[in-house]
Image: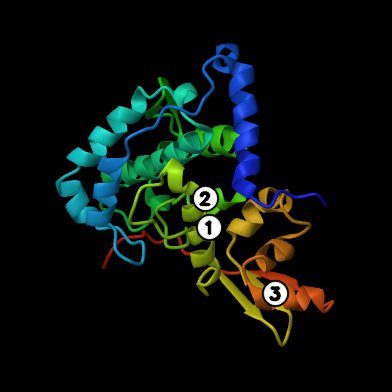
Amino acid sequence: MNQSPNPLARSLVVVTLATLALHPSAAAQAPGSARFDHSGLDRLLKARVDADGQVDYGRLRGDSRELDAYLASLATVALSGLAPEEQLALQINAYNAFTLRLILDHHPVASIKDIPSGERWRARRFRLAGETLSLDDLEHQRIRRQFDEPRIHFALVCAARGCPPLRREAYEGSRLAEQLADQSRRMHQDERFVRFEAATGVLHLTHLYDWYGDDFRKQAPSVAEYVGRELPAVRAALDAGVQVRVRWLPYDWSLNAQP
């Protein structure tokens, strides 16, 4: 199977071609010159997220001015003028920021699933680049459709403890490859998300690999093969001909709130 050594580089080709197809004039003003200011979100995350990726929702609700200013800036951004890596970083940040606002609007809740279903992932209420989107629209119709980059599933945070840990910094186009690689390592080194029993060949995985298996299999022949890129023990077992069996770990939907 002919695979790009850099998954992010491959994904950026996809979005660049899509941009040119949707905006023919973009060929004359090649995307890549514009950058977006995520400093407000970055300050917020450093102040309200701890080292484990848990959020101080109480204090954030008490002063959400920085979050709301960042959301306002997303409403009018011109995505077509951004470099592809900037587009992806911005949309990951937007998803996570929108989710913070969703939780604040229903706080206190013990879980995002306590929010009525019609007001949760499918509610079209968030403004991005002149459009009104739901979280599902942003994740499935924009990010997953435009980018061949499965590591987004280690960066999009749905406000549950079973989700990836929220970073204490905003994603930046200039550092996106590094940040996604770090998120991937962080997930695969945490037994809440990945655990391999070498003696039995059983690989316990987060349901993210179940729900989005097709995305990972675009990059590797199987989910186990993909995990083997991060875990040497899994790679060694596969190379030795072990039939690695996947089992799904319980998904913790409790809120990713600081104690």
Between 2 and 55, which is closer to the camera in this rendering?
2
Residue where numbered disc 2 is placed = 177
Query: Which percent across, then down, holds residue 244?
Result: 76, 74
Q: Quadrant of residue 224?
A: bottom right
Q: Secondary structure at mark 1?
A: helix
The numbered disc on residue 181 is 1
Q: Is residue 83 above or below residue 234?
A: above
Farthest left residue?
A: 62
Q: Residues within 10 Å of mark 2 (few under 14, many from 20)?
A: some
Q: Is residue 149 above or below residue 200?
A: above
| Whole-number angstrom distance, CA of label 1 to CA of label 2 | 6 Å
Quarter holding the C terminus is bottom left
Comparing marks 2 and 3, which lies closer to the viewer? 2
Q: Is residue 238 visible?
A: yes
Q: Is residue 37 above or below residue 62?
A: above
Residue where numbered disc 3 is placed = 234
* Residue depicted at 36% across the width and 39% down the height: 98
Q: Disc 2 or 3, which lies upstream in sequence?
A: 2
Kind of residue sitting beneath label 1: Ala
Contact, CB < 8 Å: mark 1 with mark 2? yes
Q: Is residue 243 visible?
A: no
